[in-house]
Image (cartoon, rainbow, N blue to C red):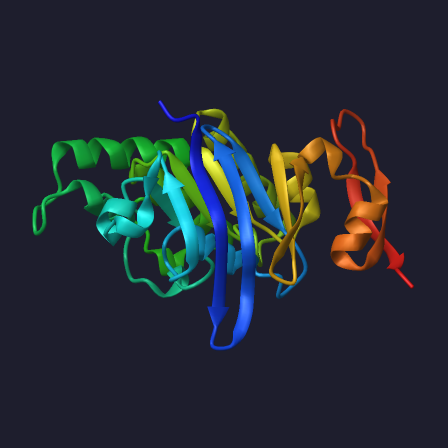
C-alpha cells in the first residue's frame, strides 16, 4: 500500500504568458490533513484544481501511485471528491438526489441507482447530519446547511481523498464551527483532506500540515504546530501578527497586528 496517497512533482501552470504556479512539489500521507494558505492571488485554488486534474498543468500528479494525467474524469472521481466554491445555491436538486449523483463513477453508464448507491447515500447523509434535509432542494438551504449537504455528497462518492476550496466562505461563525467540526470528524474517520482557506486559524486548528503559497510559489511547508511564528506569517502575508491562547486550546490563535514596514 502506498503511504503517500497524493504526490505532486514540479507542478507549474501558466495562463497565457503569465506564470500562475511555479515548480511546486509536495506530498500528503494517507489520512493526512493538509491546508493550503496564502494571500489573495497566491494561486491556492489554482493549485487545488491542478492537483485534481481540472486544469492542464506541467509536472506530475500521483494518486495512490498512479499518474492522474492518464485518467478520465470518471476515473479520477473514484479517488478524489470535491467541494467547490459557489454555484450549488442555484441547483434545483434535493439533497438526496445530489448525493446520489455523486455516485456516478461507480455506476455503469446510463444505469440507475443501485442498492449499494442507496446505502452509501443514506450513510453519508447520516454522517453529515443532514438526514432531515434529504428532500429539501439545495437552493432552499442556508449556507451552512448547504455546505454540510455538499460534504454529504462528497462522502457518498466513496473516495479516500477530499478536496475543499474555501469551505467556510460567507458562513457566519456558528456555521463555520459546524462545518469545520464536520471536516475534522471526516478526517479523523480516515479520509485524507486537502483544503484551501484564507482563514489562518482554521488552518492552525484543523489541519496537521500547512503549505503556504506566495506569488505562485511554495514558500513554507510544515506542521501546523510550527506555523505560529510572527516572522513566518509576516513574510507570507506582509503584515504583522500577534498570537493569543485560550483555555484548553492546543494551538494559539493568530491575529494581524499591523503592517510590516
Across the whole image, how many numbered discs are drawn on residues?
0
x, y percent for residue 167:
52, 50
Looking at the image, the residue that sits furthest to the top is 1
x, y percent for residue 226:
74, 34
Vertical side of 185 occupied by 93: above or below? below
Q: Nearer the viewer, residue 69 or 193?
A: 69
Residue depicted at x 66% and y 36%: 222
101 on left or right of 34: left
Q: Nearer the viewer, residue 72 or 129?
A: 72
Q: Quadrant of residue 151?
A: top left
219 on left or right of 144: right
Vertical side of 92 occupied by 243: above or below? above
Residue depicted at x 66% and y 55%: 38
Residue depicted at x 50% and y 42%: 194
258 on left or right of 151: right
x, y percent for residue 32:
51, 31
Report the quarter where the N terminus lies. top left
Report the quarter where the C terminus lies. bottom right
x, y percent for residue 191:
43, 31
Q: Nearer the viewer, residue 167 or 57?
A: 57
Looking at the image, the residue that sits furthest to the bottom is 16
Q: Quadrant of residue 206?
A: top right
Vertical side of 116 occupied by 13: above or below? below
Residue depicted at x 9% and y 44%: 108
Q: Is residue 161 visible?
A: yes
106 on left or right of 43: left
Q: Is residue 152 visible?
A: no
Amino acid at each position: 500500500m502506498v503511504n503517500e496517497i497524493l504526490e505532486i512533482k514540479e507542478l507549474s501552470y501558466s495562463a497565457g504568458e503569465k506564470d500562475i504556479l511555479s515548480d511546486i512539489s509536495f506530498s500528503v500521507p494517507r489520512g493526512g490533513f493538509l491546508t493550503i494558505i496564502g494571500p489573495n492571488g497566491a494561486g491556492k485554488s489554482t493549485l487545488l484544481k491542478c492537483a485534481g486534474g481540472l486544469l492542464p498543468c506541467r509536472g506530475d500528479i500521483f494518486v495512490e501511485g498512479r499518474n492522474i494525467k492518464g485518467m478520465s474524469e470518471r476515473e479520477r472521481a473514484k479517488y478524489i471528491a470535491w467541494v467547490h466554491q459557489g454555484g450549488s445555491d442555484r441547483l434545483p436538486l434535493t439533497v438526496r438526489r445530489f448525493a446520489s449523483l455523486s455516485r456516478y463513477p461507480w455506476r455503469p453508464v446510463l444505469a440507475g441507482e443501485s442498492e449499494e448507491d442507496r446505502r452509501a447515500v443514506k450513510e453519508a447523509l447520516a454522517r453529515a447530519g443532514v438526514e432531515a434535509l434529504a428532500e429539501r432542494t439545495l437552493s432552499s438551504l442556508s449556507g451552512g446547511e448547504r455546505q454540510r449537504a455538499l460534504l454529504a455528497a462528497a462522502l457518498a462518492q466513496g473516495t479516500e481523498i477530499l478536496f475543499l476550496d474555501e469551505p467556510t466562505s460567507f458562513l457566519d461563525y456558528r456555521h463555520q464551527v459546524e462545518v469545520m467540526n464536520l471536516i475534522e470528524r471526516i478526517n479523523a474517520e480516515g479520509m485524507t483532506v486537502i483544503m484551501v482557506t484564507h482563514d489562518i486559524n482554521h488552518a492552525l486548528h484543523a489541519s496537521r500540515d500547512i503549505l503556504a503559497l506566495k506569488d505562485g510559489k511554495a514558500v513554507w511547508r510544515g506542521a501546523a504546530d510550527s506555523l505560529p511564528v510572527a516572522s513566518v506569517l509576516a513574510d507570507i502575508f506582509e503584515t504583522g501578527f500577534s498570537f493569543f491562547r485560550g483555555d484548553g486550546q492546543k494551538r494559539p490563535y493568530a491575529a494581524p497586528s499591523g503592517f510590516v514596514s
